[in-house]
Amino acid sequence: MSAEYFQQARRLEPELLRFMQDIIRILSPSSGEGAVVQRIAEEMRALDFDEVTIDPMGNVIGRVGDGPFAIALDGHVDVVDVGDPEQWTRPPYSGDVEDGLLFGRGASDQKGGVASAVYAAALLKRSGLPPGVSVYVTGTVQEEDCDGLCWQYLVKEVGLKPALVLLTEPTSLGIYRGQRGRMEMEVSTSGVSCHGSAPERGDNAIYKMAAIIADIESLNEQLEPRAPLGKGSVTISEIRSVSPSLCAVADGCTIHLDRRLTVGETEASSVAEIEALPSVKAAGATVTVLDYAVPSHTGLSYPTRKYYPSWQMSEDDPALDAAQTAFRDTFGEEPATGFWTFSTNGVATAGMHGIPSFGFGPGHEHFAHAPNEQTEVEHLVRATAFYAAFIDEFARTQGERES
């Protein structure tokens, strides 16, 4: 049956590509996804989904089937800004196709996964869903600003807690089973301002921060890799200061830390690590884990802490067995496997809520947030086929285990 899904997905290619071009051409920054959410809902209805809703946060949720065994195909619909437009060789929202490549912001990260998931669910409904199964396709919001926030809301407020989540972030058509976590912290120093003509009268907060910056650079080099996710990291992504004027000694300085978390690293351990630095102690600096409370495109604010735990699926999980079988049967070759370098909504589905999760998506991680973002049209077709084949295979094998 898996090979048949590939043939059916191939026949859907013109419609799939048209839909993908449509959603690429709709600007959808975090907290500004309303138009693309409506377009996705429109496509779901045209494809005869059994139910299409937009929740109060603004996530679009499409369902086919009504069985008790629920599987979700998740993809976020927001994108980052284009950056310097001069670095793009064609308009960033063109949706142009050339030599089998589709170009535009979101092509890999990650509207391709959303488009393929929508068409996979439609394909399954047309060919006949496995008995007892419901398939949810979630087009989620605000991921680029706050990964996993949408799934915190879906689980806690909407009550959607499927048996498994397949994340459609780009994997170059490999099967990914986890990622490092991340968190955002600030370190702040304080001083005493005075006139810049006589700096010795004051206490410069920036100078206090200089030693902290050096210690954090050294800390990053000392972090140990831990299997299977590799090495955690910490980097300074922003520095700012305050003073009465540009002719005065700074009485405040703050740095923003991007901390990536490997196995066993937590919010508490990471904060303690920074607080233990000799320079932080000497400066009397404060370490703060940040919060996120930005309204979604519907105006709803759902505050959360900017701590996103690492997660991984066991190599012998039945879902991964089914995924590898579905890939072999569909494409006649062995799948590549791995882990994401960046973060995904899995921080909430698997990391916070314990929902088994893994990833498979069209496009490539290295095009995420980069100029000239692109994906192969063939990837869209293959992802559509894989999603359908996996759900069929996983539902069948689950049924055999329970019988």
Image (spheres, rainbow, N blue to C red):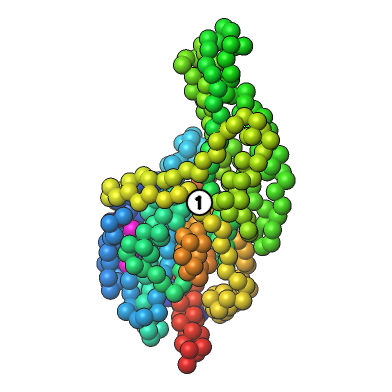
What secondary structure is found at the residue carrying circle 1? strand
Residue at (40% x, 59% y) in the render: 152
At 69% from the left edge and 35% from the top edge, which residue is drawn? 278
Q: Residue at x 64, y 27 (%)?
A: 210
Q: Residues within 10 Å of mark 1 (few under 14, many from 20)?
A: many
Near-viewer residue (120 or 308): 308
Residue 124 spot, x, y in % from top left: 39, 77
Q: Where 285 falls versus 169 (above or below)?
A: above
Query: Residue 28, how many percent across, how many down?
Result: 36, 48
Name the outermost residue toward the bottom: 403
Task: Point out the residue furthest to the top here.
Answer: 197
Q: Give the main secondary structure of the magenta stretch.
A: strand
Residue 298: image location, x then y, percent: 27, 50
* Magenta-drawn segment: 58-62
Examine the image and state in which quarter residue 199 appears.
top right
- Amino acid marked by disc 1: Tyr
The residue that disc 1 covers is 307
Residue 83 location in percent, x, y?
47, 38
295, 288: nearer the viewer = 288
- Give me the residue at 60% from left, 61% from top: 339
Asked whether residue 88 is in view, the answer is yes
Instruction: Tally the marks.
Output: 1
Does the magenta run of residues contain 319?
no
